Image (cartoon, grey):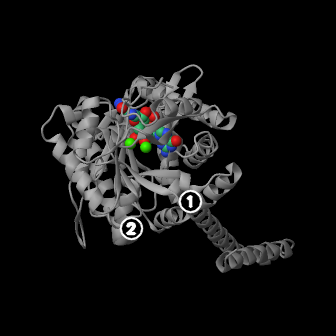
Amino acid sequence: MDVLSLAALVTLIALIVLLVLRAGDDLAMAESLPAVLAGLIASGLILLRQWKNGRNAERAARGTTAYRQHHDPVTQLLNADGFIEALGRQTQAPHGQDQSLVVVSVRLGRLRDIYDRLGDGCGDEVLRELSRRLVSAFGERSSVGRIGENMLAVFHPATGGIRQALVGGQINRLMDLPVATPVGEVVVPSTIGVNFIHAPGIAPRDAIRQARLANAAAQASGAAMAFFDDSLDHAQRLQMDLEVELRQALQTGDLQMVYQPQINETGATIAVEALMRWPHPTRGQISPSVFVPMAEAAGLGEALGRYAMDKAFADSKLWPGLRTAINVSPIQLRSPAFMSTVRTLLEKNAVKPNDFEFEITEGVVLEADAVVLQNLEHLRKMGFQIALDDFGTGYSSLSYLGRFPIDKIKIDQSFVTPLEERQDAAPIIKAISELASAVGLKILAEGVETRGQLEALRAQGCNQAQGYLIGRPMAASQIIEFQADAQGADHPQKAVAA
Ligand code: C2E
Ligand code: CA
Ligand code: CA
């Protein structure tokens, strides 16, 4: 209680006591009654005012907390909870049932990068400017929120005007205009996911999830905008089912390894590449180009890599004298635990590094950080060879070739296929071969399918080859047979497909 309220209360009590004491004395009572009554009313009013003030202050404090709970502190837009509540009020309200709405998610690409480069103050300013643009683009009838670190969202009645602005790309263009900062202009490329809600009473979380799915679809296809439709929901459900099944397959050992032979200039088998297969019980063979990236997105990259290495180490004992190449993903190489996994598996399978090669991609080379470089150096010191896979498909920067710890490059199939069709294909192989030999690297061509391609490759100085002409990927047990058939012959064999 504050001092004023206390004084008023004391006065009030004193006056009541006075009234009680003078209750028997009519004369004294008559003399003092007006003053006592006035005192009583005044102190009563003061007490009432103080109580009201207190109540208002409490309400204001509660209001600020509620505001904070539902708003983003940087943009003052609704936050995720606030946006979900507001959207829920709209979709669940009786009048909202027949009003169609559009929910839009706007992903601000590179925002993290801008925060990192320009600092929090500048990043916040850029974010506020982009929020203002979105608010002004959608106008008064919309609600705008910040539902993720770099994700804004809007809902609005699905009017013809909004439809036109979205389809015509106006919103994208507005968001992509440069934003002025103290250090110059920055552009924050946006992707937009649009969800026209047709189902009345849809749960707000579902409506937002669908808008985000559309956004992810736009990102995946490199488009600036995508619209939600049911196929996206099915695709996401399929992806989730596959993830669960892949986890199981890893545990139950249902993923298989097959091996594809590599030959030298005499046609002798010198190595095999280990490739993973997922024979799915109901969906048939699933390609590693599908399930490897999926496993990585689901956080299973390291487990999958460990599985492949373990199997390949074990199987390799069937073909002493042949090297075994194993694909490793950037995720594995970036892991500080990678080297101890390698050592553990070498020991477990009682095999030696000299019999193995790890295949890495150009992406690994260009984004190599200290851990990756250290891991590669360690592997080579231990006796492993390193091959650069899919050479020529990535950034085609040759500057790293001499400096990077690699032993071999694998020319991608896209350079091999046109060898019999285009005049300019052979000189490229020749240039790569000369470059490789100048910096002391071995060279192998992938995806060799015809005799003509093999001959053209050899004529240009590329002597090692791998491809369907020589042999398809096959089960471990078939490699010995293949090796025996092909030994010393300059006639590559076609093996049975695994
Ligand atoms: P990659 O490492 O470039 O493997 C070569 C791919 O080309 C294999 O596809 C192989 O079957 C295919 N191929 C070989 N010769 C020919 C040919 O003459 N013609 C044609 N058209 N294709 C040929 P696959 O087995 O489907 O593997 C696809 C990709 O999946 C691999 O490409 C590799 O990047 C990845 N992958 C496979 N196994 C593993 C693994 O154990 N770990 C990791 N991280 N990635 C793997
Ligand atoms: Ca490979
Ligand atoms: Ca390759």
List the residue tagged with mark 2: 116
Q: Quick one: label 2 or label 1, which is nearer the N terminus?
A: 1
Q: Nearer the viewer, residue 319 or 63?
A: 319
Q: Nearer the viewer, residue 76 or 258?
A: 258
> Residue 473 in the image: x percent, y percent?
47, 31
Say if disc 2 is inside 8 Å of ligand 1: no
Q: Do the residues labelled 2 and 1 touch (CB within 8 Å)?
A: no
Q: What is the total number of numbered labels drawn onto the structure image?
A: 2
Q: Quadrant location of the N terminus?
A: bottom right
Q: Nearer the viewer, residue 448 or 140?
A: 448
> Residue 232 in the image: x percent, y percent?
42, 29
Mark 1 lies on a secondary structure that is: helix
Check disc 2 and give the amino acid type: Asp
Label of residue 376 in the image: none
Q: Is residue 274 left or right of residue 22?
A: left
Check disc 1 and give the amino acid type: Thr
Residue at horizontal 58 percent and vertical 58 percent from the top: 338
Q: Which of 256 and 222 is in front in this view?
A: 256
List the residue tagged with mark 1: 65
- Residue 204 visible within the image: no
Ligand 3 visible in quadrant: top left
Which callout, 2 or 1, points to the residue nearer the camera?
A: 2
- How crowded is the residue under tag 1: few (<14 C-alpha within 10 Å), some, or many (20+)? few
Residue at horizontal 29 percent and vertical 43 percent from the top: 138
Position of residue 433 relative to residue 292, above or below, is: below
Residue 29: image quadrant is: bottom right
Say if disc 1 is inside 8 Å of ligand 1: no
